[in-house]
Each structure stands twice: as structure tokens, then as C-alpha cells.
Amino acid sequence: MALMKMQVRCACRHRMGLEVGIRSQRDLEILKNFLAGLPRVPEVSIHIRRGKDFEFYFSDDEPCRNKQYVDAAVSLLDALPGISVVVHDESDPHARTLSASGMEAYAGACRAIDPSLMRRGKILYVEFSGRLVPRDYIGLMESIRATGIGSVGACIDTGHVYYYYRKKVGQRRGKAVESMSRFIGEVRATGVPVSYHVHDCTPESPHPRYHVFDHRPVGEGEIGLGGFRRIAGYLAGEKVTLEILPLPDPGKNALTDEEVGLLTGYAASHGIDEGRELRNGRIMKRTLEAMVESRRILDDLLASL
Ligand SMILES: [Zn+2]
């Protein structure tokens, strides 16, 4: 929680939104209590992770099960704080394509949850995570749009899209950037609301702790400044979240006395190892600084358009 407080402060100071991932009802309760205790709350986007409590399995075309997923989603979406919710493109966890009935079931589920989203002024963004092939993902957005659903849209994650074309399709760097740009254009052309997760990707070297290839600071991966310049026109004035994972080590970062107090106080009251909490605090601080720097780089690219 001390680490969360550091994030909230940074988000407020730099007018950036805050993205929080939750996996369970328990996470949700902790988050709600945490937000309720804050003097200032930045714009919060909730990323729903697959877990035992949450299953967005909308492509299941068995009507009874589909209805259960829809009912569970409606009560969850009602209970969530914030106005935007992100969920990965859920289809059969092993399949890469949606059958016609799976596509219809997915769009039908979105139509069923649309009224409760509308009532709460929320938008559910379905994120392309490379599980679906782009053709089916875009087809899904087209059918969502065609049924007049107003509050379900697309989340375009630059790292996931780039990784898909670079590694799963095997394109060269420049080509993968071109494909990413075309993908964004096609998703936008469907007319659904779009939000962006922006981060760089290092397809050849996974993060030492999280073992993923993306979620790196802007300009530090293969997409690079040239790649982000290529898509900057799409990002201008849009809802952009920098989704950068904690950096692998704290570097030379020093904490302020106040930050030390926050972290050691939290460690003491929760029986956590103080040294570990301080190290995590330094990693968090360095990561937040990298996010601010990524934001600055993006703003500069947008200003130069
Ligand atoms: Zn993402």
C-alpha cells in the first residue's frame, strides 16, 4: 500500500491516470478501501485479470454458460470504481480464431452488459493481447459496433501488437511497425471507443523478473522513437496509459526522508521486511520516473507533428 501511495502521488502530480490490475474479489475490496481513504484520486482504470473470481469468457457459445458469464460481469462492473475497465481478448484460451458462433456469442454478451455500463458511465475496453488473430479481433469490434453497443471498445496495447507481428508472424522491425500502424488504423475505422496502452517491446530479451518482452519505457525497445513517431498521429488527444512494468533493479535511486518514513512505517505495521520494502520503494520510484520520462517523450513527439 505504501507503494500504491507513491504511485497515486506521482499520478496526481503529473496528471497521469492510474491503472490497477485486480484478480479477485479480495483485490477489489482492498482497492475500494484504499481509494476511499485518499485525499485526491487520479483517474482510475481497472485492468481485470483472469482469475478464479473473474472470468470474461464471452465467446462461449453455450447459452447457459454465456449468461452466467454475463451476469457475473454485470455485477462486477457495477461494483468497480473508476470509469474505464480493461479486459484481455478472451476467447477459448487455446484457440486463436473465433468461430462464427463464438463471435456472435461475444458480441451478444457485450450487448447484454451495455445497458449497465451506460447507466454507470463506464466503458469496457477489450484489449488485443495477441491471443486472437488481428482479423478476428477487428471482426469482433466491427460486430460490436454493428449492434449499436456504445460502451464497449478496443484497447490497443502497442507492445502486444508489435510483439504479435514481430515474433508470432515473424516480420522484420520496420514491417512490424508498419503492421502495427495499419492495425491501429483498422481498429479505429470500426468506430468503437479506443484506448491505448503504450510501452516499448524487446522481443529478444525478456524482463528478468516478469518474463515478458514488453512493458518497457518508450524508446528503450525495438519500437523505438521512430516507431512511436509513426503512430503518434493516432495517439494525439486519445486516452493513453503508460503500462510500464517495475524496472528490474533500483539503480542509484535515493528516496526522500518522507518516502522512507512511508515505506518503513508500512513495513513495521504489516510485519514486512523493511529492507525489502525500501528496495521495492526505490524500484517503484525509478519506474515512476521512467513513466514520467516516457510521457515527456510522447508529448514531444505529439508536439512535433
Ligand atoms: Zn496492456
Image: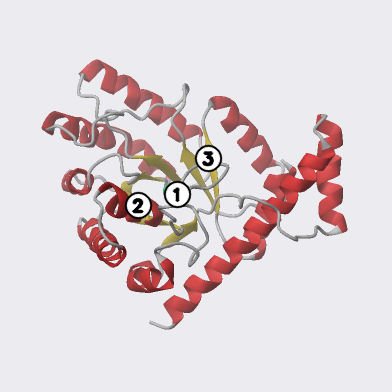
Left or right? Give the position of 257 relative to 74. Answer: right
The image shows residue 2 at horizontal and vertical percentages of 75, 44
The image shows residue 128 at horizontal and vertical percentages of 32, 46
Question: Residue 188's image quarter?
Answer: bottom left
Instruction: Return the disc, 2 or 1, that comes first in the chain's sequence.
Output: 2
Q: Residue at x 49, y 64 (%)?
A: 218
Residue sticking out furthest to the top: 64
Q: Circle 2 — which element?
A: helix
Is residue 15 something that shows in the picture? no
Q: Residue at x 46, y 34 (%)?
A: 49
Residue sticking out furthest to the bottom: 304
Left or right? Give the position of 251 relative to 192. Answer: right
Residue sticking out furthest to the left: 100
Label 3: how many Cα within 10 Å (few below 14, some 14–19, many 20+): some
Q: Which residue is mark 2?
A: 163
Q: Which residue is mark 3?
A: 21
Q: Which residue is mark 1?
A: 213
Q: Amino acid at mark 3?
A: Gly
Q: Residue at x 19, y 43 (%)?
A: 136
Is residue 295 something that shows in the picture? yes
Above or below — where is 52 with respect to 198? Answer: above
262, 277: nearer the viewer: 277
Q: Amino acid at mark 1?
A: Phe
The dot on residue 243 is none
Q: Residue at x 25, y 37 (%)?
A: 111
The image shows residue 156 at horizontal and vertical percentages of 35, 54
Q: Amino acid at mark 2?
A: Tyr
Instruction: Return the disc, 3 or 1, that comes first in the chain's sequence.
Output: 3
Q: Circle 3 — which element?
A: strand
2 vs 3, front mark: 2
Q: How many marks?
A: 3
